[in-house]
Image (cartoon, rainbow, N blue to C red):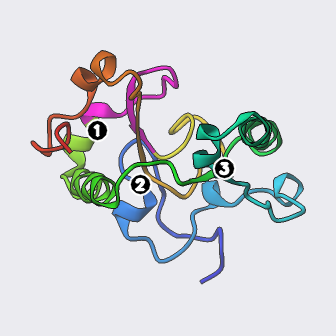
């Protein structure tokens, strides 16, 4: 089957492409050629451990963060100090959230990009003509005490993990 040609219609509000188990790429996920990146991005790797060192090393790390944020808007961090077990627990409980029935996840569906907790598949689900091939759960986290009460209560261990 060709990309962009799919006999079934798709509504991001009702189901994500992943949840529907589609065997093709729906047209709303095909980015027009003119809007596709011309080059592959070189993702910056920022050593957060350098922020703990003396002035020249710290200044260099801050400059790398600034440059990466302006150039691409994202970066990879290493030596951040978060233990592997904490990361593993967070990934595990997040996967449990995505395994919930659609009706449960839809409780957090929103097109409001400023909402502190938001489930979706694109920036404006059902509105944007081109959708992103992803499903996400976004929530604010810093400072944790200000936001954790907004986080999902299902799965029951989500907030704890």
**Gap in angstroms between the C-alphas marked 1 and 3:** 29 Å
Residue 70: x %, y % from top left: 80, 36
Residue 116: x %, y % from top left: 40, 23
Lateral position of residue 59 relative to residue 26, left or right: right
The magenta-colored residue range is 107-120
* Sequence-first disc among 1 and 3: 3
Q: Which residue is mark 1?
A: 106
Per the image, label 2 sits on a secondary structure element best described as loop
Residue 41: x %, y % from top left: 79, 60
* Residue located 12% across and 44% down the image: 157
The residue lying furthest to the front in this view is: 54
* Sequence-first disc among 2 and 3: 2
Per the image, label 3 sits on a secondary structure element best described as loop
Residue 98: x %, y % from top left: 28, 54
**Gap in angstroms between the C-alphas marked 1 and 2:** 11 Å
What crowding class fits label 1: few (fewer than 14 Cα within 10 Å), some (14-19), or many (20 or more)? some
Q: Quadrant of the C terminus?
A: top left
**Gap in angstroms between the C-alphas marked 2 and 3:** 26 Å
Per the image, label 1 sits on a secondary structure element best described as helix
Q: Is residue 3 above or below residue 133?
A: below
Q: Which residue is mark 3?
A: 75
């Amino acid at each position: 089957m060709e990309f962009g040609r799919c006999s079934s219609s798709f509504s991001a509000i009702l189901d994500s492409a992943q949840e529907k188990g589609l065997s093709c790429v729906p047209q709303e996920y095909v980015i027009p050629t003119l809007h596709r990146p011309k080059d592959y991005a070189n993702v910056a790797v920022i050593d957060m451990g350098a922020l703990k060192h003396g002035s020249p090393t710290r200044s260099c790390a801050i400059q790398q963060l600034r440059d990466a944020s302006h150039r691409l808007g994202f970066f990879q961090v290493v030596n951040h100090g978060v233990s592997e077990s904490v990361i593993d627990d967070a990934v595990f409980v997040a996967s449990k959230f995505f395994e919930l029935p659609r009706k449960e996840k839809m409780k957090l569906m929103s097109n409001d990009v400023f909402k502190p907790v938001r489930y979706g598949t694109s920036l404006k689900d059902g509105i944007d003509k081109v959708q992103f091939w992803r499903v996400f759960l976004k929530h604010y986290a810093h400072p944790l005490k200000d936001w954790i009460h907004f986080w999902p209560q299902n799965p029951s261990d989500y907030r704890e993990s």
